[in-house]
Image: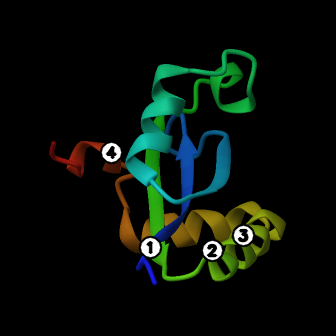
Amino acid sequence: MENREYFVYIMTNKKEGTLYVGFTNDVYRRAKEHKDKVIPGCFTARYNLDKLVFYTTFQSAEEAMIFEKRIKRWKRPYKTALIEQINPEWRDLFDDFSL
C-alpha cells in the first residue's frame, strides 16, 4: 500500500486578510496553482490569495477532509490563532519549499 500525505492549508493575501482553507495531496503544487491563478475566476484568484500561511499533514485523506471541514466552520479568531501558532509573522511558507 502506498504511503501518501494529505494536507490542509490556508492561503491569504496579507496578514489579517481574506482566508481560504483547502485540502490537497500536494501542497506545493496546489499553492503554486493558487499563485499562478490557473483558474482565473476562482475565489483565490479573485481575491489574490497567493500566500501559503499554514499547512499541516495527515496520513489519510479522510482525516484531512474532516479537519478541513472543521476549520471552515471556525470563526476567524480561531483560524488566526491556528496560523499564528506556527507562523506568527504570516510569512509565505511556499518560500520554504526547495526544488
Q: Reply above or below: 84 against 93.
A: below
| Identity, as a three-letter code, of the amino acid under mark 3 | Ile
Residue 39 coordinates in the image, percent (x, y): 66, 21
* Residue matched to label 2: 61
What amino acid type should be assigned to the residue bearing mark 2? Ala
Q: Amino acid at mark 1?
A: Arg
**Nearer the N terminus, badge 4 or badge 2?**
2
Judged from the image, the secondary structure of the residue bearing numbered disc 2 is: helix
Q: Is residue 68 left or right of residue 36?
A: right
- Tell me whether the residue at label 4 lies in contact with that at label 3, contact meaning CB atoms closer than 8 angstroms: no
Q: Which residue is mark 3?
A: 71
Determine the CA span between mark 3 and mark 2: 15 Å
Tag shown at residue 67: none
Asked whether the residues under the numbered discs 2 and 1 touch, taking CB atoms below 8 Å apart as contact, a structural biologist would say yes
Q: Nearer the viewer, residue 98 or 11?
A: 98
What residue is shown at x 65% (from left), y 82% (from top)?
Answer: 63
Identify the residue shown where x is 25% and y is 43%: 95
Q: Which residue is mark 4?
A: 94
**Residue at numbered disc 1:** 4
